[in-house]
Image (cartoon, helix red, strand yellow):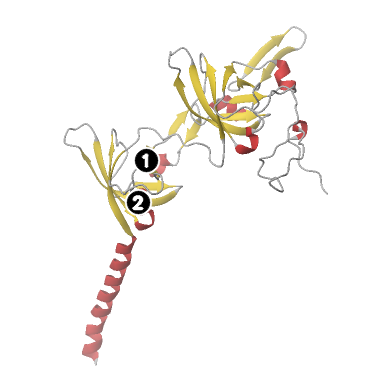
Amino acid sequence: MAVSLIWAVPVIAAVISIVLVVQNLKKFGPLITIKFADASGLDANQTVIRYRGVRVGSVKSIALTPGLRQVSVVARLDRSAASLARDGSEFWIVRPEVGAAGVHALETIVSGPYIEALPGPAGRPLQKEFIGDNEPPVITEPDGGREFVLHTTQIRSLGASSPVYFRGLPAGQVQYLDLSPDSKMVNVHIVVKPNFASLVRSNSVWWNAGGIDVTWHLLSGLNVAAENLRAVVTGGIAFNTPNDDAGPAPAGMSFELRDKPEEKWIQWSPAFNLTNTPTASAPGNTAPIDLENINQPPKPQ
């Protein structure tokens, strides 16, 4: 009996080991290869792949391509994230960044860089080799955000993800910047959140809200103004609409981006029917909202 018990212990241990191995194998997804121009900061068996903040894979090996022009990163995805291995998926390296749009990914100073993933369109064929992006892809505002283009001859402190404000409230953000075809203007592509989109009219005015505006008046003395602290640090854009608005601005409409606002623009206070606010009680709710009191909490019933 004692002999049987002695042999039973290693058998049970072997069975448990096999079960654990099988369970781990079930978690394994496909191996993919991502080629980057620069893989500094990545480490095999340490760097992870994330999607929406969740770990969905890890780097297994890193090597130079035969032509020494790229770095080939082999990674294994978790089974739950296997659908990331499809045509159109994008991968880029997230490192700490301090720029015009703010401070990003400071946690990577301690944990090290990681690879961020963005899945391709549903229904695309499976794929195992990808070209990594040098920069994060432009991700449009979800849930019906409306895009516009602002033109200016010179940008000050704007960058991708710089905020867009309406009466000091964050109403959208900058997507990206590029030059006009004749290289004379800078195009600032922005997206306005759904619950602010109807505030953009054909005659709305836009101005650079970054930095601090210091002016001197003979009677009032020195005046210092800024949109808010974030705008001082990261830059930003603000807009307003005249009381006699010219109708809703269609998506994609272009506007001039002014360097600073005129006093009368700040004083404009039109009232609109906001039909697409998330807090509307019903789809047909079009009760007028006084923008003069938009920052005020609702009165108790």
The vertical placement of 253 against 137, above or below, is above
Between residues 90 and 71, which one lies in front from this camera angle?
Answer: 90
Residue lying at the far right of the rendered structure: 301
Residue 217: x %, y % from top left: 72, 9
Where is mark 2, residue-wise?
Answer: 57
Question: In which quarter of the view is residue 240 placed?
Answer: top right
Residue 197: x %, y % from top left: 62, 33
Can I make out residue 113 in this image? Answer: no
Residue lying at the far bottom of the rendered structure: 1
Q: Residues within 10 Å of mark 2 (few under 14, many from 20)?
A: many
What is the CA distance from the residue labelled 1 to the residue labelled 2?
14 Å
Query: Mark 1, mark 2: which one is toward the viewer?
Result: 1
Between residues 48 and 292, which one lies in front from this camera angle?
Answer: 292
Between residues 20 and 286, which one lies in front from this camera angle?
Answer: 286
Question: In which quarter of the view is residue 108 placed?
Answer: top left
Which residue is at 62% across, 21% downward? 206
Can I make out residue 264 in this image? Answer: yes
Tag shown at residue 233: none
Residue 287: x %, y % from top left: 76, 40
Residue 201: x %, y % from top left: 66, 26
Which residue is at 65% across, 33% downward? 198
The vertical placement of 121 against 28, above or below, is above
Amino acid at pointer 1 = Glu
Where is mark 1, residue-wise?
Answer: 90
Secondary element under disc 2, as helix, strand or loop, is strand
Amino acid at pointer 2 = Gly
Which residue is at 35% across, 35% downward? 133
